[in-house]
Image: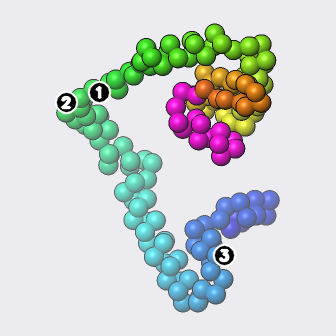
Amino acid sequence: MSADEKKKNLDETPIYKVKRRVPLLPKELYEELKRRHDDFMEKYMSVYSPDNLGNVVNYEGIYEEFIEQGETFHKPIRKRNADAQKHKLDIKESMTTDDLNLTKQGLEYIQTKISKPSFDTWFKDSLFNNRDSVVTLDAQNKFVLAGLMIGI
């Protein structure tokens, strides 16, 4: 724990955390853990201290080796097939003003429940239709439908 009274309980060592979680830890075991911890930290800091770290790890060599052996890969861009785009256009053309309002309200509700990046990825292009008191969701894939079914 911190020696500074104002920072009490802010600077907890791992040993203190172990002791707090295992309150019945025998004193001998605690002392052994503390000794091993101190030995490890002394050895670790002698090799990996901030002053010595640049000498231990050759970052330029690692980077040069990566450039020599590395190969650039580009993920292929998948385009929606023409049938899916046509289907979406057909649905949009058949939507009424009530459907557009329902879609707007539904998407606004979903947006309040998840992050903007998630919304843009999964729900942004979804459409809602209401026919005979049955609401239908047109989504880009099954994952979106599953997310809505479990009640985002």
Specify start and end residues of the magenta stretch as a single range: 139-152
Q: Nearer the viewer, mark 3 or mark 1?
A: 1
Q: Name the one closer to the observer, 116 or 17.
A: 116
Q: Secondary structure at mark 1?
A: loop
Mark 1 lies on residue: 73
**Which quarter of the rendered picture does the C terminus lie within?**
top right
- Which residue is most to the front? 132
Tell me where residue 60 appears, x and y as whole percent: 29, 34
Quadrant of the image occupied by residue 58: top left
Which class describes the residues within 10 Å of circle 3: few (<14), some (14-19), or many (20+)? few
Above or below, comparing residue 88 to residue 25 in the picture: above
Question: In this rendering, would 18 be left or right of 69?
Answer: right
- Looking at the image, can residue 4 be seen? no
Is residue 69 found inside the magenta-colored segment of the image? no
Instruction: Give the Cα distance between marks 1 and 2.
Output: 15 Å
Above or below, comparing residue 38 to residue 57 in the picture: below
Tell me where residue 73 appears, x and y as whole percent: 29, 27
- Which residue is most to the left? 69
Find residue 20 and name its label.
3
Tell me where residue 61 appears, x and y as whole percent: 25, 37
Q: Name the one closer to the observer, 69 or 131.
A: 131
Q: Which amino acid type corresponds to the residue marked 1 in the rendered image? A: Phe
